[in-house]
Structures are given as C-alpha cells and as structure tokens.
C-alpha cells in the first residue's frame, strides 16, 4: 500500500506540476493524460488541486519508511 501511495503521489505531483507549467508557458505537454482529469476552463485550479493531492498522498508513504 505504501508503494502504491508513493507512486500515485509521484505521478500526480509530476502531472500537476507539468500541467501548471504548460498552462503558464503554453503548449508544452509532458503528461497529456492529466488534461482528461481537469474540466475545461478550470485548468489552473485543477492542476493545482492535482499537485496538492499528490503531495497529500506522498506524505504518508514517506512517513512509513
């Protein structure tokens, strides 16, 4: 379970971070699957939520060792 939370948190952190970067810099999409998780018109808030959710999932995985 620890590994699953760690991997999922890592993917969400990277997806949210690259989504925010592509939203601000324009055009560069590294993780294209996250655009299906975010509603149209709310990209910045959606990517920020993915980033925070990834951090919240990665913290318990890191604490368990």
Image (tube, grey):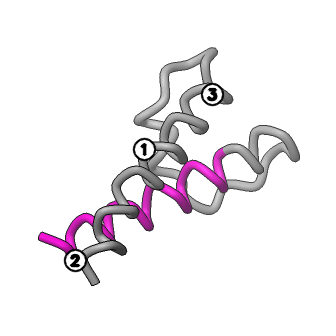
Pick the residue in front: 41 or 47. Answer: 47
Q: Which residue is mark 2?
A: 3
- For the residues carrying marks 3 and 2, which lies nearer the camera in this image? 2
Q: Please report the bounds of the magenta region as a residue range.
A: 1-19
Left or right: 35, with 17 as reference point: left
**In the figure, residue 3 lies in which quadrant?**
bottom left
Measuring from the top left, give residue 41's x and y in whole percent: 63, 15
Measuring from the top left, give residue 39's x and y in whole percent: 49, 21
Instruction: Indicate whether 45 appears above or below 48.
Output: above
Measuring from the top left, give residue 59's x and y in whole percent: 39, 62
Q: How many marks?
A: 3
Between the residue at mark 3 and the residue at mark 1, the CA separation in whole angstroms equals: 15 Å
The C terminus lies in which quarter of the figure?
Answer: bottom left
Q: Circle 2 — which element?
A: helix
Q: Which residue is mark 1?
A: 53
Check residue 47 for magenta coloring: no
């Amino acid at each position: 379970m620890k590994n699953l939370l760690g991997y999922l948190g890592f993917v969400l952190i990277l997806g949210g971070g690259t989504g925010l970067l592509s939203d601000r810099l324009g055009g560069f999409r590294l993780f294209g699957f996250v655009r299906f998780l975010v509603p149209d018109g709310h990209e910045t808030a959606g990517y920020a939520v993915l980033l925070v959710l990834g951090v919240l999932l990665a913290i318990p995985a890191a604490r368990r060792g």
